[in-house]
């Protein structure tokens, strides 16, 4: 892609972030995260309303992730030549439609179809977010811009899902999805007013998926994403079961609130330092996550120490999506949009895999095995990050010296044949 293709119309002055536009994107992220997780908190009401079993209703979360994982790369390729703003607005309109149908549907199959469409919209919007944030930001502040956009994740986990669940308990589960539709409409208006358009890519300048996947640094980052997301979901998906086994079943909401608040602090710290210390922050996140999981395993029967461990876990976790997606964007450079589509696909596939693996481990090995899995993952991630000093997780000086990856550095067809 030529530099003119990615030029910023009316770019903000150096040192000034376009907060309104970035917060509009963060709101869209907030909506996607809540939309994905909301059925977990509304499961009893949805099951009764649609007349299905709990296991069947639980697939409302699974089908959302499947919709994202299966369609993000095809949809990103199909819309690559479109203006970025129309694509984002189309994705948000998909949320309005999907959540409205979910709120009104009395048919299980129709509800599942709506959830699949919501997952498609999520994948398409997420594939745009990091590239959009980078293009909106002044030079040298891209990481901070991504951190602002990604702040929608811990906010949704800490506040959005519990509030949505509360609305479901007071008014009904349909009303919760109706609120999501209303929020998506407001997000569309905000994006339309505050976010500029950027041109799509010309066909001849697009990077094929296979070439993007083997750009130096990208394979190591993808390995870290796969290991981290699987391990995180092994434990987080079953944190209620973990706590219940050790006498804290009545404290799940408070434990998750501590985790969410610590995650918000983490993303604030990440945003303040990511443009200078991405490598160090990623190492710190791996160490904190591993240490927190070890503390959970060792002190599982000491409630006060469980809260401390969960707070450390949140501090380690909150900035991770920003760190890994920023690293992927830096490594991908001109192929960043294609790399981001790969990130979204892998993230959702790993989420599903982590949930499935955690369930098997809980039954076969017990709850402590979930925490020790995260410890092992933290050690493996630390090794990959430390060894990826040149391309995947470079020091600040390496990023500054390297600059964007030139087109000549992208692997050609011969390289791909050799890899095969």
Image: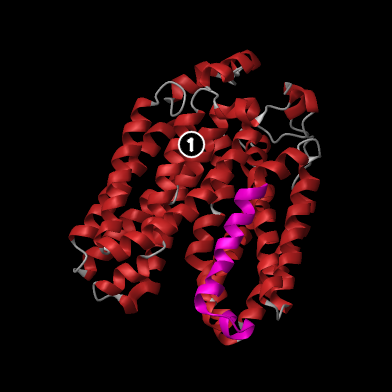
Between 187 and 238, the one nearer to me in the picture = 238
Which x, y percent locates residue 8? 74, 32
Residue 359 vs residue 198, the one in the foreground: 359
Percent of width and height locating residue 414: 60, 14
Residue 194 visible? The answer is yes
Q: How many marks?
A: 1
Q: Is residue 66 found inside the magenta-colored segment of the image?
A: yes
SS at circle 1: helix
Magenta residues (range): 46-71
Q: Residue at x 51, y 71 (%)?
A: 40
Quadrant occupied by the N terminus: top right
Q: Is residue 145 above or below residue 206?
A: below
Is 154 magenta? The answer is no
State whether the magenta stretch is mostly helix, strand or loop. Answer: helix
Asked if residue 122 lies left or right of residue 354, the reply is right
Residue 72 image point, x, y percent? 66, 46
From what the image shows, is residue 207 above or below residue 126? above
């Amino acid at each position: 892609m030529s530099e003119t293709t990615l030029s910023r119309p009316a770019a903000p002055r150096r040192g000034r972030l376009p907060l309104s536009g970035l917060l509009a994107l963060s709101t869209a992220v907030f909506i996607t995260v809540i939309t994905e997780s909301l059925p977990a908190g509304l499961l009893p009401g949805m099951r009764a309303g649609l007349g299905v079993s709990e296991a069947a209703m639980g697939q409302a979360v699974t089908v959302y992730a499947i919709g994202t994982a299966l369609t993000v790369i095809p949809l990103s390729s199909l819309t690559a030549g479109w203006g970025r703003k129309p694509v984002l607005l189309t994705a948000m309109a998909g949320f309005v439609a999907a959540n409205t149908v979910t709120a009104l549907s009395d048919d299980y199959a129709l509800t599942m179809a709506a959830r699949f469409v919501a997952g498609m919209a999520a994948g398409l919007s997420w594939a745009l977010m990091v590239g959009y944030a980078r293009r909106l930001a002044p030079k040298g502040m891209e990481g901070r811009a991504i951190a602002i956009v990604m702040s929608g994740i811990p906010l949704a986990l800490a506040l959005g899902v519990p509030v949505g669940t509360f609305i479901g308990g007071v008014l009904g589960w349909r009303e919760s999805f109706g609120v999501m539709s209303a929020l998506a409409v407001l997000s569309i208006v905000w994006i339309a007013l505050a976010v500029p358009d950027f041109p799509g890519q010309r066909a001849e300048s697009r990077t094929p998926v296979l070439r993007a996947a083997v750009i130096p640094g990208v394979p190591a980052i993808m390995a870290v994403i796969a290991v981290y997301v699987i391990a995180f979901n092994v434990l987080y998906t079953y944190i209620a079961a973990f706590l219940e086994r050790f006498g804290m079943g009545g404290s799940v909401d408070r434990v998750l609130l501590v985790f969410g608040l610590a995650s918000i602090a983490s993303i604030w710290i990440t945003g303040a330092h990511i443009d200078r210390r991405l490598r160090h922050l990623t190492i710190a996140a791996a160490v904190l996550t591993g240490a927190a999981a070890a503390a959970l395993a060792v002190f599982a029967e000491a409630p006060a120490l469980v809260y401390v461990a969960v707070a450390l876990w949140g501090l380690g976790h909150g900035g991770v999506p920003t760190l890994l997606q920023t690293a992927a964007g830096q490594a991908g450079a001109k192929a960043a949009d294609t790399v981001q589509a790969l990130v979204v696909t892998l993230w959702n596939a790993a989420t599903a895999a982590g949930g499935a693996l955690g369930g098997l481990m809980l039954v076969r090995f017990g709850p402590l095995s979930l925490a020790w899995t995260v410890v092992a993952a933290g050690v493996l991630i630390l090794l990959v990050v430390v060894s990826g000093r040149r391309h995947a997780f470079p020091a600040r000086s390496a990023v500054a010296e390297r600059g964007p990856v030139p087109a000549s550095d992208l692997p050609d067809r011969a390289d791909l044949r050799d890899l095969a």
